[in-house]
Amino acid sequence: MKLDKKVVIVTGASSGIGEAICFKLAEEGATVVMGARREDILEQNCEKINQRGGNACYVPTDVTFRGDLERIVKFTLDKFGRIDVMINNAGVMPLSYFESLDHDGWDAMVDTNFKGVIYGCGAVLPAFLDQGDGHIINISSDAALKTFPGGSVYTATKAAVNVFTEGLRAELSASKGIRVTCVMPGATISEISSTIEDPKVIENRKISGMEEMRMLLPEDVAGTVLYAICASKRANVNEIIVRPTDQA
Ligand code: NDP
C-alpha cells in the first residue's frame, strides 16, 4: 500500500472532502487521525474504517480554537510517535453579498478558513522541525483565483490561504525539508453550500447553471491529495487546481 505506516491528521473530517480524504488515505494504509466538531459522525467513520481493516481514530476538534489543534497534534504524537502529514481542510462557506453585513458569517469564514489553517500549521510545526520532515497540505479553493458577487469574504480567506501556504513553503521547504502543498478544488458535491442563506447568492447559483453541472465528487479531491503525498520526497507538489471537466 502506498501510505503504509504514514500518520496523517485531517481536519474537517466529518463530511465532504475531508471525510473522503480519510477513507482514501486509510485504504492506502495510512493511520488517520480525524478532527471535526461532530463527534458522532467521527465515531461512526472511525468504526467503518477500522472494520475495513484500516486504522483510524478521532479527536473532537474545533479549528477556531488553537488549543484544539494543539490537542489533536499532542494526541497523535503520544499515540503514534510521529506525524507525516497535516491536512488543514476544515472550512465554511456562508456566502453573502457584503451589503447584507453578515458579521457572523464573516467571522466564521475568517476564523475557520484562514485562522484555522494557520493554527493547524503552527500546532504541527514543532513536531515536523523535530522530525526533520513532514508535509502540510492546505485545502484552499479555485475561488482563491477568481472572486464573484457574494463571494468577497470567502474568496479572500482562500486567497489568504494560498499566499500563506506559499510563504510557508519559502520558509520551510528548502531549509527544513518540510513539504507544503496548496490544493485548490473547483465545485465539489458536499454539504458546504447548505449554509448559504442569501437569496441573491442562491439565485445567482441557479442562473449560472452550476447546480446542474457535473461537479467533482469528494473522492476526486481525495485522489489529488493522495497524488501530492505520494510524490517522491524530492518533489514538493506546491499547488494543484482540480476543477470539474464541465466547469467553465
Ligand atoms: P463540508 O461542509 O462537507 O465539510 C466541511 C468540514 O469542515 C466538515 O467536516 C465540518 O465538520 C468541518 N468544519 C467546519 N467548521 C469547523 C470548525 N470550526 N472546526 C472543525 N471542523 C470544522 O464541505 P467541503 O468538504 O466541501 O469543504 C472542505 C474544504 O474544501 C473547505 O475548506 C472548503 O472551503 C473547500 N472547498 C470546497 C469546495 C466545494 O465545492 N465543496 C470547492 C473548493 C474548496 P463539523 O461541522 O463536524 O465541524
Image (cartoon, rainbow, N blue to C red):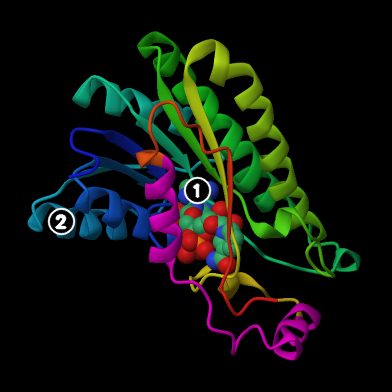
Q: In the image shown, does 197 or 93 lie closer to the viewer? A: 93
The image quarter in which residue 185 lies = bottom right
| Residue 10: quarter of image | top left
Beta carbon of the mark 1 residue lies under 8 A of ligand 1: yes
Residue 86: horizontal and vertical position, in percent? 42, 34
Which residue in the structure is indicated by mark 2? 47
Callout 1 secondary element? loop
Q: Which residues are magenta?
A: 199-228
| Distance in Å between CA atoms under marks 2 and 1 | 21 Å
Quadrant placement of the N terminus:
top left
Identify which residue is drawn at 57% across, 39% down. 116
Quadrant (top left, top right, bottom left, bottom right) of the C terminus: bottom right
**Taking 67 as reference, is 155 left or right?**
right
Find residue 89 and name its label.
Answer: 1
Q: Is residue 12 left or right of residue 143?
A: left
- Visible residue check, residue 65: no
Dominant secondary structure of the residues highlighted in magenta in the image = helix
Which residue is at a point 40% across and 48% down the rendered structure image? 227
The answer to whether residue 245 of the structure is visible from this angle is yes
